[in-house]
Amino acid sequence: MTDTSNLYDVVVIGGGPAGLTAGLYLARARYRVLVLEKDDFGGQITITNEVVNYPGVGRTTGRALTQTMRQQAKDFGAEFLSAEATGLDVDGDIKTVHTSRGDLRTFGIVLATGASPRKLGFEGEAEYAGRGVAYCATCDGEFFTGREVLVIGGGFAAAEESVFLTKYASKVTVLVREPDFTCDASVAAETKRNPKIEVRYNTVLDGVTAGQGGLREATIRNVSTGESETWKPADDGTFGVFVFAGYVPATDLVRGVVELDDHGYVVTHGYLETSVPGVYAAGDLRVKNLRQVVTATADGAIAAVELERYAKSMSEKTGLVPPRPTASAYEQAEASAAANANTAANAGTTPAPAPVKRSADAAAAAAQTAKKPGELFSAAIKQQLDVVFGRMTRPVTLALELDDTPLSAELQGFIGEMVALSGGKLNSVVIDAAGLVSAVDGENAPTELVVGEPATIALPDGTELPVYGSLDDNGRAEFDPAGLLPVARPAVRLCVWDEVAGRLTFTGLAFHGVPSGHEFNSFVLGLYNAAGPGQPLDDDLRERATAASPTDIMILVSLTCTMCPETVLASQRIASLNPAVRAEAYDISHFPELKDQYGAMSVPCIVINQGGEQKVEFGKKSVPQMLSLIGA
């Protein structure tokens, strides 16, 4: 082998905290490292709404924490690839990682594929997943407001999440297989003393049955006596089941390649080496007594340092040197800072003081980012918006389809402030239920949009969209929940002005409701993608997106869901590249008709209409996963 263009010092399989940390350490040491991830970079922690026990970080979200980790690794020169590892050849000095996008050759490998929520296999679990059976309290808890829920499990997650669910549920019944909780006593104590929680020990769930509106009965069994009983909510209504029964290691890829224990976890030795030289394991997939973000990052660092030595020895042995990073973003920034300091010194001036580090004091941080009275966005968010608006290459006109509800007024105020902050990159037009323009805003708004005149919005092929409707006695817009991408108001459609046709052209991206909460970031990035140049995307994914057949994607979301934004963003990134694809998100809390139409008791709920056929899916989807879902 003489061509080293496809040779790496290390390939990291898995883009969670362990994999990202390994990538960061190796890249900082100037080794060529690639982090491979088939789903969403960040791993399982991205669905955690609040992280408070990561040292040095007072309070953050799982997604924010791992986004920072990825950016750090990227700044040091780590490479990233969205693809699935399909096989490994680990014999010899140079190993091969087979992926869905070709083969990668490498001296060393870090296995960091993590683990996924364990499915228990009770009767009805698969059938009613997303329709009463859930695995994320943060995302799906609000669907069971005022109802009873069952929580299955006796560990940390079950204890903590059962308390969280009392925010919504009228009562929480926890089924623990063991005689007591298996987590820390202090965590379990909070669950035990909560008046809205009943704990039943030595008890398991054997099955659930459904009727009108959702789950109606559960069969539970006492493992000590063997006695079974039928369980129903006290009001004989519907209920939810939340499963927190641990995780299953994602080790199918390495079964028969490295040593696993009886439960499928990778067996590691002193410094996390596996039974195969040059192959290391880090994070939740290996045998260990604590699976937390902090131990995952520690694993990644330990494995990376060992692989630095291994890659160096293999390079010396084979005479092959991968094209290692020499001018990372981090090094360029350091060089620029040094150059500026030298320039200042040569000019006889003193250098500017170093930037003040972020204060760890919560009060200072709150004051720094506080919103002024009457403002919707903090100073920090405005700064982020300035960056996005500055990069947009064409103006976007936001078409607001409103009714006479307070939610419409909220949406109009929300969009109005964004238009004011955009520096002319955003305009807005308000369209009432009669299809007439009732307001126009923005310094670059098309002059053809005239208050009191009809509004026309068309698809890229010229097909006009309906922009009118009827209101009920409460001023709420009526719509057909069974329709394709229902015209549910209020809604904001991302449009561009067609100078030739003299009308608004719909980009295929829309949000029904107010895109705040967890959906704010996905909405802002949707603006960037609609305006161009858009978020970077690998060439093969871009080609697949542009080649996709006509598809309508409806995503039912909740503003409290941490998994929904990724799905909305992935769908709308595809729509921004392909005029035959539409991707519209609906805040399910404001449009309960859609929840009933699709029996959705979990979000994100994805409704795909393609070629006259419809399918419903649940769960977070990345761009590659969404492309596969629509057959692209």
Image (spheres, rainbow, N blue to C red):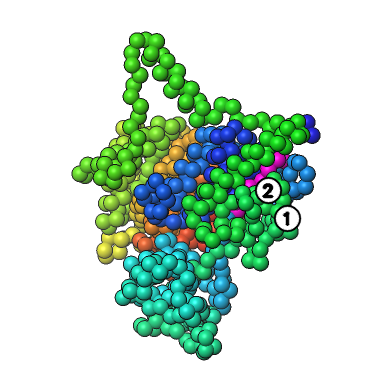
Distance CA(mark 2)–CA(mark 1):
10 Å
- The reply to whether dot 2 and dot 1 touch (C-beta < 8 Å) is yes
Q: Is residue 616 visible?
A: no
597 or 255, which is in the foreground? 255
Q: Nearer the viewer, residue 465 or 330?
A: 330
* Residue at 66% across, 46% down: 109
Q: Which residues are magenta?
A: 105-113
Q: Which mark is residue 257?
A: 1
Q: Is residue 379 shown left or right of residue 343?
A: left
Identity of the residue drawn at 28% across and 51% down: 410
Q: Can residue 221 be seen here?
A: yes
Q: Decide whether residue 280 is among the magenta residues.
A: no
**Residue on which disc 2 sits:** 279
Q: Is residue 458 above or below residue 136?
A: above
Is 602 located above or below residue 627 in the figure? below
Could you say which quadrant of the image residue 321 lies in?
Answer: top right
State the image coordinates of residue 549 (x, y, percent, origin top left).
Answer: 61, 50
Amino acid at pointer 1: Val
Residue 4 in the image: x percent, y percent? 72, 32
Q: Main secondary structure of the magenta part?
A: strand
State yes or no: residue 111 in magenta. Answer: yes
Pointer 2: residues within 10 angstroms few (<14), some, or many (20+)? many
The amino acid beneath tag 2 is Val
**Quadrant containing the N terminus in the rendered view:** top right
